[in-house]
Amino acid sequence: MVLNQKPVTFDDHSPSSDPAPTKEEDRLEAIASPNLDGDIAIPGDKSMSHRALILGGLATGTTVIHGLLESEDVLRTAEAVRAFGPAVERLGEGHWTVTGARWESPAAPIDCGNSGTAARLLIGAAAGFALQASFVGDGSLSQRPMARILEPLRRMGAMADGDFLPVTVRGGHLKRIHHVNASASAQVKSALLLAGIQAEGGVEIIEPAASRDHSENMLRAFGCDVQSSRGRINLDGGCRLTATSVDIPGDPSSAAFPLVAALISPGSNVCVRSVMINPLRAGLFDTLRAMGARLDVAPRGQKGGEALADITAAYGRLQGVEVSAERAPSMIDEYPVLAVAAAFASGRTILHGLAELRVKECDRLAAIVQGLRACGVDATAEEDTLVIVGADGPPPGGGSVEAHGDHRIAMSFLVFGLASRAPVTVDSAASIATSFPGFAELMRTIGGRIA
Ligand code: S3P
């Protein structure tokens, strides 16, 4: 079934205003597609897009953004920032302006949809102001843990009831805290940094391992001094943000799908241009190389303060690999598609330290195992370790995979079906628009048979 993935525009004003797709419309099927070939660009980075809108809304003056990802998750953040008072305008595709203002109580609850990044970062930013705001989300987001941000925000002086959405936050008059993060979560770190902008004395966060540092990099671009050394991130009080221009490069988490498709589909060669390769996001590429992948990463300078590369992937044999927990933060969103690559490799792949996958858009660890088994692959998860027995070539496929409303599970198993022996069907196809609108169309341009 062809899903009508119409690009969402801000003019729609409501990313969820479309009627829910029927079960049939919400399915996509991928069929073996050898010789994938092309030179493509992918949409802007999701993490940076959320941050550009929020920091723009906190800054003095008008921030100009180019390359904004116009996915449902990011449009939720755009609407939310506007609801707090800043002016947010769409001038053209990916071209937006945000004029900052003192944030005020919004007239209605802030609907974060499916987006954990929107919820956590917006709650942090809003908590800095003397306002009251309620935050709601869809069924998946309402089950994701918010205590990890609400507990430290309460210690800073914010008031919030409950530990899951819906939650009402009363902010303002925050004081400095020193917070030790239990996991390497960039969302928690970012929520506290955003609250810390307005807190007396700022904020200090200790991370058990480095998580993505886009907030720190972008805060510096907006003129705020963030010090970061050996897992200790400090923001002094009294920092003032000044509007700037932000150029957002391609999202490595989205680039992962066409690149892995090329690695596993015989005869393929695909180049993805201008992919952001911040080392704290590039764990997948290191892991694929350790599996013997034919990946060429050609540096292409910088964009928006982040390193860029053109990445080319060519089909070849892959070997299983064992990956330690230390690498997890730098590829946390890429485990579903890595699991697909592992299913085509020779030997076992053992992935450690995956506890956080249990609290993503769905329980991704369970969804990966379920999906792989439905496609004839031997996979097991024990505690936070995933073991996949590779088929040393194309596995059977033929499964009907439940994506549990999770965009990355849906895209990963469509990639699987592009190279498995029998086609693969996924449900929750509409969820793909939360991070990668136009995914199926783009895959078709390189020869991927997805319909
Ligand atoms: C994100 C951080 C990660 C990641 C998510 C985006 C961000 O979540 O999984 O997709 O933009 O800060 P955690 O902070 O929960 O690890």
Image: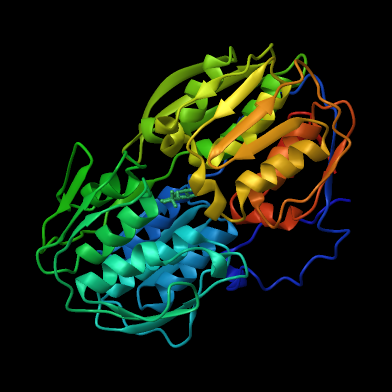
Looking at the rendered image, the quarter that the C terminus falls into is: top right
**Residue 100 visible within the image:** no
Q: Nearer the viewer, residue 282 or 268?
A: 282
Q: Position of residue 101 (x, y in %)?
A: 28, 74
Question: In the image, what residue occupies the spot 35% across and 56% down?
Answer: 188
Q: Nearer the viewer, residue 53 or 277?
A: 277
Residue at left offset 53%, top offset 16%: 289
Give residue 181's position: percent from left, percent from top.
30, 52
- The residue located at (55%, 72%) in the rendering is 137
For this view, does 93 lie left or right of residue 147? Answer: right
Residue 158 placement (x, y as % from top left):
26, 77
Residue drawn 76% across and 69% down? 20
- Between 66 and 395, the one nearer to me in the picture: 395
Q: Residue furthest front?
A: 382
Going by the image, does 382 lie left or right of 414?
left
Q: Quadrant of residue 306?
A: top left
Query: In the image, is 330 to the left or to the right of 234?
Result: right
Note whether 70 is above or below 357 in the view shown.
below
Question: How far across and down, in percent of the image, does residue 383 sit?
Answer: 55, 42
Image height check: is 299 above or below 225?
Answer: above
Q: Left or right: 108 with respect to 255?
A: left
